[in-house]
Amino acid sequence: SDVWAFGVTMWEVFTDAQIPYCEISDDAVLRKRVFEEGLRLSKPRGCPDWIYGIMRECWNHDARRRPTFSQLKKRLGQAGGKWEYRVPTCRLGQQQQQHTQQGAETYLL
């Protein structure tokens, strides 16, 4: 479902675009482990507990128990600027450096 995929996309954001389940190369084994055995992606380092909780809800085996996009929008919107996740910035071009601090950290809110 799209909500499941949204949870995976959130996980990818917090892992710097790592490939989900990259350690499992066989699609049949992956389906069995995820859908029959309940395998879920682990909590990314630096990810707030409440965000990982939302990811886990998106991956609920029972699609009816997953949040809707309206619910997700509301919950994530309510957080507003209450949390931050630090990601290192790359070196910027000379022109861009005039507007930002070199070596500073970027915050995704």
Image (tube, helix red, strand yellow):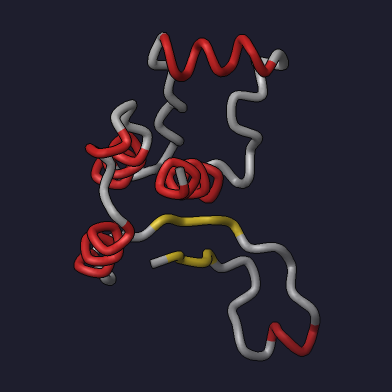
Instruction: Write the residue at 40% across / 31% down.
Output: 43
Say left or right for 82 vs 103. left
Say left or right for 59 vs 11. left
Residue 55: % across, % down:
36, 41
Instruction: Write the residue at 41% across / 9% down.
Output: 37
Say left or right for 6 vs 96. left
Give the farthest residue toward the front: 64
Q: Quadrant of the C terminus?
A: bottom left
Q: Quadrant of the N terminus?
A: top left
Residue 63: % across, % down:
32, 36
* The image quarter in which residue 58 lies: top left
Residue 34: % across, % down:
47, 18
Instruction: Write the residue at 52% across / 11% down.
Output: 32
Say left or right for 75 vs 21. left
Instruction: Write the residue at 25% across / 39% down.
Output: 64
Instruction: Give whichever of 101, 59 is nearer the camera.
Output: 59
**For residue 104, above or below residue 29:** below
**Total numbered circles:** 0
Instruction: Give whichever of 95, 45 is nearer the camera.
Output: 45
Residue 99: % across, % down:
62, 89
* The image quarter in which residue 73 lies: bottom left
**For residue 67, above or below residue 73:** above
**For residue 26, above or below residue 65:** above
* The image quarter in which residue 4 lies: top left
